[in-house]
Structures are given as C-alpha cells and as structure tokens.
Image (cartoon, helix red, strand yellow):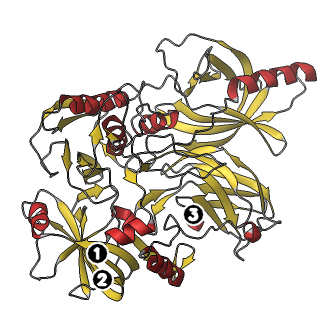
Amino acid sequence: MNSPKINNHIIAIVLILSIAIMGIAENAGALTLKMSLEELASGADFIIVGKVLHQESHWNRDKTAIYTKVVISTEEHLKGRAKSDDITIAVPGGKIGDTTVEVTDVPDFSVGEKVVIFVRPLTDKQVADDGLVTAGDDAPWFRIHGGFQGKFSVLEDKIGNLPLVKFKERISKALTGGVPAYPESESMLNPESVSSIQTISGISPSSASAGTNTLISISGNGFGASTGTPYFYYKDNGYYGCQSCVSAWSDSDVVVKVPVFTAINGYSASAGSGPVYLTTPAGDKSNAFPFTVTFSYGGIKWTGASPVVEFKVNTNGNAAILKAVQDAADTWNAVPNKSFSFKYAGTTSAVKTSGNQINEIIWADLQDGIIGQASMRSIGGVISECDITFNTKFKWNSDASTPKDAMDVHTIALHEMGHWLNLRDLYGNVSGYPTDIDKIMYGYGGYGVQKRTLTLYDTLGMRYIYPGANPCAASLSLTNSPYHLFVPILNTTPNLWVDFQNDPSLSTNMMFRLINYSETTNPDGYKVCQPSILSWVDGNYILQIPELIFDGTSYRIDLTYVPTTDGLIWFMLSGVWTN
C-alpha cells in the first residue's frame, strides 16, 4: 500500500469533513426571566409543602380553552396560611379526549407527588377572565408563582440532590434575604465525588439532537459490565439520569439515546448542552465530558407536506411592534430548504388566547417571571392551533437597539414561534462546556437582550421537523449498477463535496471507495449544513454522516475506514440509524 498517498488523501478528507462548530459566547437568552429563591419567596403569598390529591382537566366556561385543576393537600406551611388545607391550583393546558393543549413554562403534576409550591391566590376578576369553573366547591383558586420555577418535586426527601430540610432552610433564609442566588440542587459533580476508575475519553458524535431517538456512543474505560446510569445536563446545576435511555453498556462503550423528560418541577424538559457523566450501579461517578445538544423536538407537528401557518396579531395599533413580529416570522421563513412557513393574516382584537381555530399573538397579563408564553392545541397528535402571549408586566421595544429596561419583541417572538414548530427549550449554560446560550431556543431571557438571528442549530431543528428537498444531505443513488454516495459539505467557502462508489465487483461487503473530492457550485445558494465529521475512534477513522437521503427516507450512518493494500481509500458501512 502506498502509505504517503493514502495519508495525504486522509488529510484532505479531514480538511473537508472535520468542520468544527465554533464555541458559543456567553450572553442572555429569551422566554423566561430567571428568578432567584428570594424572588420566588418574596413574590409568593403562600409557600406550601404538600401532596397532590387529584387533578382533572376541564374546559373553561366558554369551552374555548382547557385548564387543569390540581388539588394539593397541605402538609406544612412555610409562608402564610391559607383558609383551607386543600389548595386548588389552576394550570393552563391539559387533555380532554383527543384534544391536548400544551402551554410553555407551566409545571406539570402527578397524583401522589410530594411538592413544594410557591403560590398566589387568583382574584375574582382573574377567575372570571379565565372562565374557571368551581365544579361545585367554594375553594379559592391559586396559581403557581413564577411559572414552572415555582414548583419543586420532592423525591426521597430531596429536591434534586438537595435534602428537603436544607431546601426549607434556604426558603427561611430567603424570606430574610440571606440565600444563594438560585434554587439549584447541590452539584452532583463535586471533585471529591468523581472516581478515578470510571473515565470517559470521548462521545461520538459530539453533538446530537434530543427527542429524535438519536444514539450517541460514550467511550472510555472502567464502566463495568452492569448497566449504570448516564446523566445529561439540564439547568441550574441540575442533571437528568436516564437508565432507560441506555441501548448498550460495556466496560468501555455505552450507547445512549439523547433524552427528553419531565423535570423535577414537572416541566417538559430536555437534555441540554454541557457536561455528561456516567454512574455505576454502585454509585461511582465518572468524569464529566462535553456534549452539545443541537436542538430538541417535542414529537408532534402540523399536518400537510408543506404547512403554511397563518397568524394574526393584536398590538393595539402599534405599527412598529407589528413589524417586529412579522420580521420574526420572516426570520424563520428565510431558512432555506424547509417545507414550512409562517404567514401574517392581519390583526385581531383578541385580548386572551382561546381555541377559536385562529393562531393569535397578543399582549396580556401573565405570571411574574414569564416574558412570553406559547400555547399549542393538538388533536390526535397533530397540531391544530397555536397562540402566543407577551406579558404586559414588561416594557416592550422594537427599535434597532433595545434599552436595558425593556424586552425585544423580535427576539421573544422568534423564540415563541420556535415553540409553534414544537422545538423545546434548552438551558445549557455551564462555563467551560458547550452551551445553549446563543440559540434562539435557550430558555432564559433578560432585559435589553437582542437575538434576532437563528443559529445553525435552530435551523437544523426546523429542517428536521419540516425537511425540504435537502440539497445539503448526503445522497445514495444507483448509477450504472454501482451505488454512489455523494456527501456535500456546504457550510464552508468554497463549497466542497466527496464522492464514494460501491462496486460489487470490487467488494462483496458494503464498502465505498473514495473516487473524487472537489469544489462545486451550489445552485440553491444553500450554506447551512450539519457537518459530516471524520474522527479517530478506537484506532480507526469513522466517517459520521448526520443526514443521508435514500429512497425518500432520512438516515444517519457511520462509515469505518478499511486499510487495504491496493492504494485506494475504502470505507465500510458500520452503522445505520433512521433519523
């Protein structure tokens, strides 16, 4: 074998295919204003430790919206004392029959669950405006203060990794102003808790989406033969352990599905970018290793091959704000090679969201801490209607620059419309690791922040859910009997591509021979592409192609470099996954 020639070709392929995605700079995000424990405690009228007795979804009085009535039995009062020991919580959204209404930033509850909740009573006007029905009892209505941030699940007398007794101590201090900044759990990765035996040396691929059944391989040593638990970063120093996500486990290799899940506060959550680590059944922890979650998908979508989602806006005649909303829609519409679009359909006089078969964007009163809120109505797993509410408790701005005391309309609308696509929030923000902070779907926000441009990952999410003709994806085609594997790499300048050929007369296995790589012209001007990556794994080159179109179906495949003596470069098909 002509080693210098092959090595030069390998170097060339590395230059073409190993396209590094740049690190993400630290800045603020959108949607929810992070609230400290002190803010939650001071803003709530009552803080209660209790247990969920029962819950049931109801139509409101006009049958235009669904809400869930949650009854919680009080076990301990940490602040205030309600008239009744049974607290009735109104949670927007729920399911009746085949109709489901999902509302972002609200907590979820389960019967029998022990919780700590921060609540405020609803006024008679709020009850009337929401159309809540008492269902025969006179119990007053409450709502969770701060959205999902104001509800904590208690498991084995712990909130996350923090003992309940310590959490109550923090609340007590919060009421007097002496508490750490955030209601986070204790770190699960204290240096003294990390084993020197269990070592992660790599994660392949190093980035992947959540909620799409995507598998990643965690390599290293000392994992043991018995299945342990992988932990993904969630938010605020919290991690999600998912043993059910494990597909295969050995001492040196663990294959795991990137998860979505229900967080300890009941929020529909997702693995985020940041540290990943493993624990053995005995509880030994590995080191943490960096991992990027590209996007997170909620699992349902609008019907039709190329849905056009019309929307109406009530901005009380403010033309600048209306334009900012339209600009946000056009930002999503500008994503190339996707089969989805938003369409402005005029103004509306609506002042509250309702199931009226009209997608509406309005300004109204929301809970403290929620900047903007999207609701999604679906029937039988198909999205049928979405609404967005901007919180009137905040000052809003649509100018070229955003004042430090205001929220940017374009930024928040861009995020909330991402929820209409059914992209989930991401919260990765650990310094020194990949983060989600720059992404439009980052779940925290702040005053004066502008994020009016989609990241590569936001666009990948849209294209995954609503794929277009896909000139960016690799393709496999039969040409004069041999198969050609065409791998375009379009997010560089100049545009590059690689061509492999499978010829059964030369190989009885599914092996592909490199026959060409060069520059080419992209007729569609499409520049955004999830990169194919050539990496060194267990002493060999693995070519990971994140998206391959064959016979109308999208796949993710791995090819392994095969050393030969014929002076040619061969890769063997080593893994196939349906996207």
Q: Is residue 460 left or right of residue 161?
A: left
Residue 419 on image: x %, y %: 35, 46
Q: Is residue 363 left or right of residue 188?
A: left
User: Is residue 303 shown to the viewer in this render?
Assistant: no
What is the C-alpha distance between the residues marked 1 and 2? 6 Å
Residue 449 on image: x %, y %: 42, 40
Reply above or below: 311 against 297: above
Residue 38 on image: x %, y %: 43, 68
Residue wearing tag 2: 80
Q: Which of marks 1 and 3 is in front?
A: 1
What is the C-alpha distance between the residues marked 1 and 3? 30 Å
> Marks 2 and 1: in contact by CB < 8 Å?
yes
Name the kind of residue labelled 3 in the image: Tyr
Name the kind of residue labelled 1 in the image: Asp
Decide which of tag 1 and tag 3 comes sooner along the chain.
1
Residue 148 position by quadrant: bottom left
Decide which of tag 1 and tag 2 comes sooner along the chain.
1
> Marks 3 and 1: in contact by CB < 8 Å?
no
Label 3 CA crowd tier, 10 Å (few <14, some 14–19, many 20+): many
Which label was assigned to residue 45?
1
What is the C-alpha distance between the residues marked 2 and 3? 32 Å
Residue wearing tag 3: 239
> Which of the pair 519/485 is nearer the observer?
519
Q: In this view, does 359 lie to the left or right of 493?
A: left
Q: Provide the secondary structure element on which disc 2 rests.
A: loop
